[in-house]
Image (cartoon, rainbow, N blue to C red):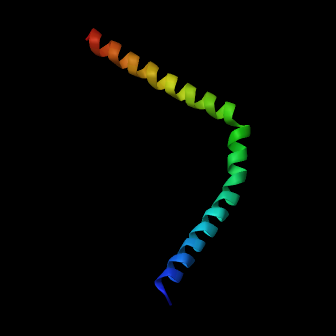
Amino acid sequence: MDEDRIVWRLNLIIVLLCGITVFVAIPYLQFLLTHFPNFLFAVITALATMGGLVLLRTYQTVRS
C-alpha cells in the first residue's frame, strides 16, 4: 500500500470519528443550552460561597 493511501485512509477515519462524536454530543449540548440558567446559577452560588469562606478565613487570620 502506498504511503499516501495510508494517510488518506487515516484522515478519513479521523473525519468519520469526529462526525460521530458531534452527532453523539448534540443531545448533551442541547440539554446544556436549555438548562444553562440553572447551571450558571449553581456556578455563581458555588463561587460566592467559596469567596465568602475565603473572606471569613482572611478576617479570622487578620484578627488573630
Left or right, residue 47 beside residue 12: left
Write the residue at 34% across / 12% down: 59
Residue 47 position within the rendered picture, expressed as x and y whole percent measured from the top left:
50, 27
State whether residue 12 is above or below residue 58: below
Give the position of the C terminus as an image quadrant: top left
State whether residue 20 is above or below residue 38: below
State whether residue 23 is above or below residue 17: above
Q: Residue furthest bottom?
A: 1
Write the residue at 67% across / 32% down: 38
Q: Nearer the viewer, residue 62 or 15?
A: 15
Question: How many labels were placed on the picture?
Answer: 0
Left or right, residue 35 beside residue 46: right
Q: Nearer the viewer, residue 8 or 24?
A: 8
Q: Residue furthest top?
A: 63
Residue 5 position within the rendered picture, expressed as x and y whole percent measured from the top left:
53, 82
Residue 30 position within the rendered picture, expressed as x and y whole percent measured from the top left:
72, 46
State whether residue 44 is above or below residue 34: above
Write the residue at 51% across / 22% down: 48
Residue 17 position within the rendered picture, expressed as x and y whole percent measured from the top left:
61, 67
Q: Nearer the viewer, residue 60 or 1?
A: 1
